[in-house]
Amino acid sequence: MSKDLGTCKITVLKRMFNQALVDAYLQVEEGYGVCDQFQDGQEFVLDNPYSRPEGFCSWAWADIRHDIMLIAAGGDPPWIKQPHTIISGCTDWFRPVIFKIERVG
């Protein structure tokens, strides 16, 4: 790993559920709801942005990995108010999860 990559923290900002899409497109059992892989407010600290943290959903990791690398490398998206921070998300549009990724070291 390059010395230039910093430590990042991933925070679960919000888990959502899109009932209208589920009703229109999915055949699911009763009780299907928000993603149960995460909890709102849950945090993951990454010393190595190349390695998925234990317990982190592999689908969500694949979706947000490019944003993690941007922030770990010191990127600063100009549309985000806080420096060294980006908002990203899992692309399960039936029950998406929104993450805040920030460089903390």
Image (cartoon, rainbow, N blue to C red):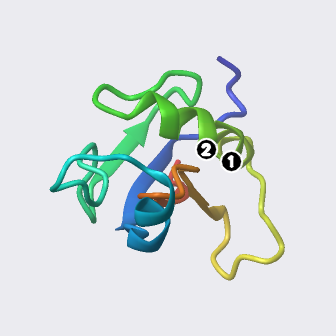
Q: Secondary structure at mark 1?
A: helix
Q: Nearer the viewer, mark 2 or mark 1?
A: 2
Residue 33 in percent (x, y) is at 26, 59
Residue drawn at x 56%, y 56% is: 89
Residue drawn at x 16%, y 56% is: 31
> As shown in the figure, which amino acid type bears the numbered disc 2?
Ile
- Which of the labelled discs sits on residue 67, or is there none? 1
Residue 74 in percent (x, y) is at 74, 49
**Depth check, front residue: 82 or 13:** 13
Apparent side of residue 105 relative to residue 22 in the rendered image (left or right): right
Q: For residue 18, what is the image quadrant?
A: bottom left
Residue 4 in percent (x, y) is at 72, 33
In 3D space, how far apart are the residues under numbered discs 2 and 1 (Cα atoms)?
5 Å
Query: How many numbered circles does the render carry?
Result: 2
> As shown in the figure, which amino acid type bears the numbered disc 1?
Asp
Vertical comparison of 14 with 89: above or below: below
**Depth check, front residue: 51 or 28:** 28
Q: Secondary structure at mark 2?
A: helix
Apparent side of residue 73 relative to residue 78 in the rendered image (left or right): left
Residue closest to the far top: 1
Q: Tell me whether the residue at label 2 lies in contact with that at label 1, contact meaning CB atoms closer than 8 angstroms.
A: yes
Q: For residue 62, what is the image quadrant?
A: top right
Vertical comparison of 43 with 3: above or below: below
Residue closest to the far bottom: 81
- Which of the labelled discs sits on residue 64, or is there none? 2
